[in-house]
Image (cartoon, coloured by chain):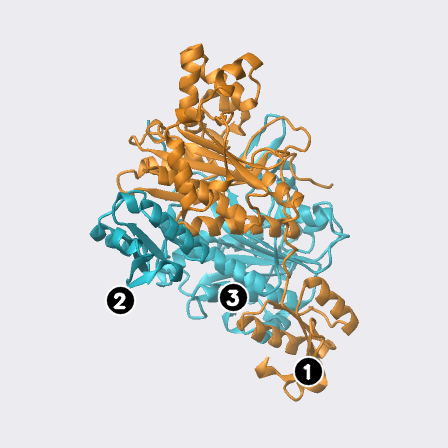
Chain colours: A orange, B cyan
Amino acid sequence: MSFQALPGFRDFYPEEMALRRHVEAAWHAAAKAAGFEEVEGPPLESLELLKAKSGEAIVEELYAFTDKGGREVALRAELTPTVGRMIAARAAALRKPVKWYATPQLFRYQRQQRGRLREHIQWNVDIFGASEIGSDAELLAVALDALRRLGLTEKEVKVRVSHRGVMAERVRTRFGADAVESTLRLIDKGELTPAQAAELLVAFDVAAIPELDGLYAACEDLGVEGFLEFDPRIVRGLAYYTGLVWEIFDRGEKLRAVAGGGRYDMLIERLGGPQMPALGFGMGDVVLTELLRDTGKLPPGPPKIDVLVVPIGEEMLAPARQVVRRLRLAGERAEAPYSPMKVGKAFQLAESSGARRVVLVGPDEWRLGKVKVKDLRSREESVREVDKL
Amino acid sequence: MSFQALPGFRDFYPEEMALRRHVEAAWHAAAKAAGFEEVEGPPLESLELLKAKSGEAIVEELYAFTDKGGREVALRAELTPTVGRMIAARAAALRKPVKWYATPQLFRYQRQQRGRLREHIQWNVDIFGASEIGSDAELLAVALDALRRLGLTEKEVKVRVSHRGVMAERVRTRFGADAVESTLRLIDKGELTPAQAAELLVAFDVAAIPELDGLYAACEDLGVEGFLEFDPRIVRGLAYYTGLVWEIFDRGEKLRAVAGGGRYDMLIERLGGPQMPALGFGMGDVVLTELLRDTGKLPPGPPKIDVLVVPIGEEMLAPARQVVRRLRLAGERAEAPYSPMKVGKAFQLAESSGARRVVLVGPDEWRLGKVKVKDLRSREESVREVDKL
């Protein structure tokens, strides 16, 4: 009987895991450089919480079920409800602004199509308790800093920015309050009729967004204004956004959005907390990794070890282990085969492991407290005392 | 309306998350030092897979449900079924021995009692395709190396070791084949009658375990033999173990096991792969963190930032952002408040953030391309050119 992962779920073998960690390392570094603190919550939440944030419609897309205690629960599809709940619970005690980030795995039950996944890893970055334009700019700069660390610059990506609140007001004055939500959804999906588009997008006046000047100026301070492009089609699909919104795309717009975020000043109140301004973004690993691949920015796989220690003959197994122990204590990644290995095979293994050095433990040298060391880059060979490895 | 995490699930606020990362960092470092590669699988698996490894009884303890596609699925309670499935799928292509580790979150639905959790983070380390005693010793040494990195030594912890296969044979010859599984469970739970204990444990002869000498010798090479204690009560609760088994305990035996593992040579075959020797262990974050707390080994919280940049007055907000940008590019963790801040309050904030330096951006110095820098440890103050920060 043989088994597979569930459809839409990924197995991370060492190569895929190294790539995931490469991306996550850039996320951690960018967030920490800007003073964001890491948090995490449970992958499973009450259905009630998830609905409170996103409405009944979200249930269709969730891995939702009733647990053995009769609770309606679901695997999280976003982190924002969890983080909002955590903020609401300690709103009075936390020093504002709160700057948090996380790298959760998120889940969405959607009909399987074209290898579409049911999970992804998302970098989630939020600021709570800040209404200044500097916070909007910093959020954007953090997202772009992670991309910079991965090798992506203004040449590869851009930020399309607009204001959901202003667009909502524009829709209301032209088509009435009842049309707002449905029309914003059409804008988000790019499904406006030509007539609607002419009315809502074409004649859109940048000056209608008072925050935009300040955003550009603050982004200039932070060195990221060259990424920005005003685009009235950006409203974010999620109804909880209230202010400036943005999405990061590859310049060629071949892929879906790499990241998206904006301001959502009403959410914490809706989750049981006080009125508190808030903004945040999410950046998923799947589109980002595609973009890194398309632009040739994927790094080579990391070496598995620094040093391979080779026991020459059965009686050298114990000495080889002692050498391994010594190397590990000195901070090197080192391993020895569990059985004696022919030298030729050992060098093949060392090459494929990315090792920089091979240490040959043979009886003649060992008797003198020595081992043979070969540097795999310089090809230099030397006999060294074990104490001085 | 206010919301909480589901019972038995943890929210990781920054302080708890930093502690979790501290523990995980030791796990990553110990595994990588010994040449183990990181992997990860889906938190959700088919119920069939989980039952194939652990039998029908496991279903009672699982978060199991039927998904929208009619599949019986469950949140993983162990990583071994996933890793076994991944090995079985690529058994022919992978170079043996395969040395893998992971740090998954695992889930168990158990009746809520005394704050017992329904999830934990577990370090999972496995070797596939090695039957030599050196692999058993290395596995143990890796577990102990992580504890050493966290400050735990022979003074705080010990390894209780025995052999499930030998004990199973002993039970069979004394009480018959039908009694083996149920009796091993009683041993694991410490629920033998005095008569059974006399028969099975008291007269247990260490010499009955041929691997033990080799294990001690190899552990001596690796510097961890001082942790070992033979203890016939160790059989591991899980039926799939076949050989040497061990558990790590605090010396005082006040807590549950910190880690447990051993050899399970039949599992890969049962999961659809070839016959392949295998061994592994799991170390959870909950008991380990309790032990670190009890022994005073918890580290202080990490500083949030290195440098706080303070805009003196509204018109210094933009210059402060430019300084922040410069510092971040230079590799420092730096932030500026989004609004001007009084100097006294800024120093309080800097202290509580763990910052080493405060940079004051005031109009008089800024006009000259300079800022005031105060070192919070030495208390030294200086005026510095912005280019030379």
Where in the figure is residue A159, as x and y percent of width and height?
Answer: 51, 36
- Label 3: how many residues lie within 10 Å, few (<14), some (14-19) or many (20+)? many
Q: CA distance from mark 3 to mark 1?
A: 30 Å
Q: What type is the residue that disc 2 sits on?
A: Glu
Question: Residue under mark 1: which chain is it in?
Answer: A
Q: What type is the residue that disc 3 sits on?
A: Asp
Where in the figure is residue B47, as x and y percent of width and height?
Answer: 62, 36
Split into 4 quadrants, where in the image is the N terminus of chain A?
top right
Q: What type is the residue that disc 1 sits on?
A: Ser
Residue on which disc 1 sits: A382
Split into 4 quadrants, where in the image is the C terminus of chain A?
bottom right
Looking at the rendered structure, which numbered label has been put on residue B380?
A: 2
Looking at the rendered structure, which numbered label has been put on residue B145?
A: 3
Compared with residue A127, is residue B209 higher up or lower down, i.e. above or below? below
Assign a secondary structure to mark 2.
loop
Where in the figure is residue B120, as x and y percent of width and height?
Answer: 47, 47
- Label 2: how many residues lie within 10 Å, few (<14), some (14-19) or many (20+)? few
